[in-house]
Amino acid sequence: MDAPSLFSDKELAFLAALVEGEISFLVVGLAAAALQGAPAVTQDVDLWFRDLADPRLAAALQRIGASYIPPTHSTPPLLAGAGTDLFDIVVHMHGLESFEQEVRRATLVQVGGVSLPVLPLERIIASKRATGRPKDLSILPALEDALRARAAEKRD
């Protein structure tokens, strides 16, 4: 069964292009938590890529009319174009291991027929705790409750 969609058709087309292009990425942050049933609200969706220079990423973006804008000394890496406004690129996750280690732990969540690799709730919690910002610490009880609820569902 699909998770409730947080995404428009254009955003789903972008995510489908990433999956179909075999680009190695993870949905991380509160959007990843929401996709796993946590009662979380966020204004963007954070994506962590193995390799932003992967030519398959550029090809997938081009296919949907979007592009990657590399970082400069004053701007982070960005996505621009059709269906990418909601997405932010993450280049580092506090409190976690390397991308290669974390992607092995990924949970697959079906959204709009697209199987998205998502950072598991316990790893989101670890990252939020390590970041230590007040806004990250304040969401921890809700994320921990969601993790306990998921564990209880699996036992039943």
Image: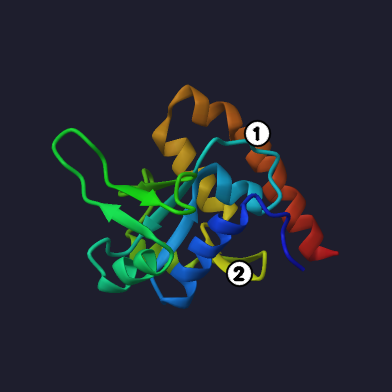
Task: Indicate left or right for 79 with 126 as reference.
Answer: left
Task: Indicate left or right for 156 with 10 as reference.
Answer: right
Residue at the far left: name it. 73
Label 2 vs label 1: CA separation?
29 Å
In-front residue for pair 65/106: 65
Which residue is painted at 65% across and 42% down in the image?
144
Task: Indicate left or right for 61 with 15 as reference.
Answer: left
> In the picture, which quadrant includes the C terminus?
bottom right
In-front residue for pair 11/150: 11
Residue 19 image point, x, y percent = 48, 72
Tell me where residue 57 sits by quadrant. bottom left
> In the picture, which quadrant includes the N terminus?
bottom right
Which residue is painted at 39% across and 61% down in the image?
65
Which residue is label 1 attached to?
141
Q: Are marks 2 and 1 in contact (CB under 8 Å)?
A: no
Which residue is painted at 45% across and 54% down in the image?
82
Residue at the far top: name it. 134
Residue 6 image point, x, y percent = 65, 49
Lower sequence index among marks 2 and 1: 2
Query: How many C-alpha atoms fall within 10 Å of the one at disc 1: few (<14), some, or many (≥20)?
Result: few
Q: Amino acid at mark 1?
A: Pro
Q: Of circles 2 and 1, which is in front?
A: 2
Q: Amino acid at mark 2?
A: Val
Which residue is label 2 attached to?
114
Point out which mark residue 2 bears: none
Could you tell me which secondary element the residue under label 2 belongs to? strand
